[in-house]
Image: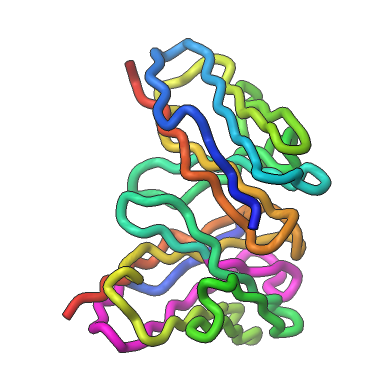
Amino acid sequence: EIVLTQSPGTLSLSPGERATLSCRASQSISSSYLGWYQQKPGQAPRLLIYGASSRATGIPDRFSGSGSGTDFTLTISRLEPEDFAVYYCQQYGSSPRTFGQGTKVEIK
Amino acid sequence: QVQLVQSGAEVKKPGASVKVSCKASGYTFTGYYMHWVRQAPGQGLEWMGWINPNSGGAEYAQNFQGWVTMTRDTPISTAFMELSRLRSDDTAVYYCARGPREWSSFDYWGQGTRVTVSS
């Protein structure tokens, strides 16, 4: 099983600032089968990024993903008020599919 | 537009079973995998398995093998997830989520079904 470790656990930032979230895998993820999801309280997760760097339909370009192998990053270039949420990475290149434990982006 | 609409909240006693439904619309039901993911209160996301609505084939995460069953009813474009021998730590929100291929991210999610297991 591939274990995904996200850091930091909580990120305290102000609107307009840049957010950098990390996801590290216990072994290499094949074909960059790595996705990022956003979840707000009481809502289902929403796909932001797939294939490590491709934005999902309707996702603003302030969200970007990068990385390969075992190290991946989600960057939010300028935080908007609606971006404060929990973010999960997920690998879907091997079974079981696994998620990181999440990074909470909170308003400073 | 793509929609996944899940059945309502359930309260069950330990040892009982629960069956959650996920009705798909806005796309060809048999053309996409359906995954199930759960989230315990205040916790992260846990993948349970998938079903291929076209073939009926399914794969379950090892943690759930032997006590989860995923099925589908193609004429009504609905997937089902049944969990048996419920325990208190099965209390969670259960989500269905669509996957374009077997190995893909989950592009649409249901709204979630809260299952509470309590004596």
Please name whichever residue, B65 or B42, is drawn nearer the observer in this view of the structure.
B65
Q: Is residue B97 something that shows in the picture?
A: yes
Q: Is residue A80 above or below residue B75?
A: above
Left or right? Give the position of A105 relative to A28: left
A9 is within the stretch colored magenta: no
Where residue B71 appears, x then y in whole percent?
59, 84
Seen in the picture, residue A8 relative to B93 is either above or below; the reply is above
Q: Is residue B26 magenta?
A: yes
Q: Which residues are magenta?
A: B9-36
Position of the C terminus of chain A by quadrant = top left
Q: Residue at x 42, y 32 (%)?
A: A9
Write down the quadrant of residue B25 in the picture.
Answer: bottom right
Residue farthest along the right direction in this orientation: A31
- Left or right: residue A72 compared with residue A4: right
The quarter of the picture where residue B102 lies is bottom right
Q: From the viewer's perspective, is A90 left or right of A94? A: left
User: Does residue A57 appear in the picture of this structure?
Assistant: no
- Colour setting: rainbow
**Residue drawn at (63%, 71%) of the image:** B50
Relative to B77, say whether B109 is above or below: above
Number of numbered labels in the structure image: 0
Identify the residue at image location x=26%, y=83%: B14
Q: Farthest front residue?
A: A26
| Residue drawn where x is 66% and y is 38% of the image | A49
Quadrant of the rendering where the N terminus of chain A is positioned: bottom right
- Residue B95 drawn at (x, y percent): 47, 63
Relative to B95, does residue A33 appear above or below in the rendering?
above
Q: Position of residue B52 (x, y in %)?
A: 70, 76
Q: Position of residue B98 (x, y in %)?
A: 63, 62
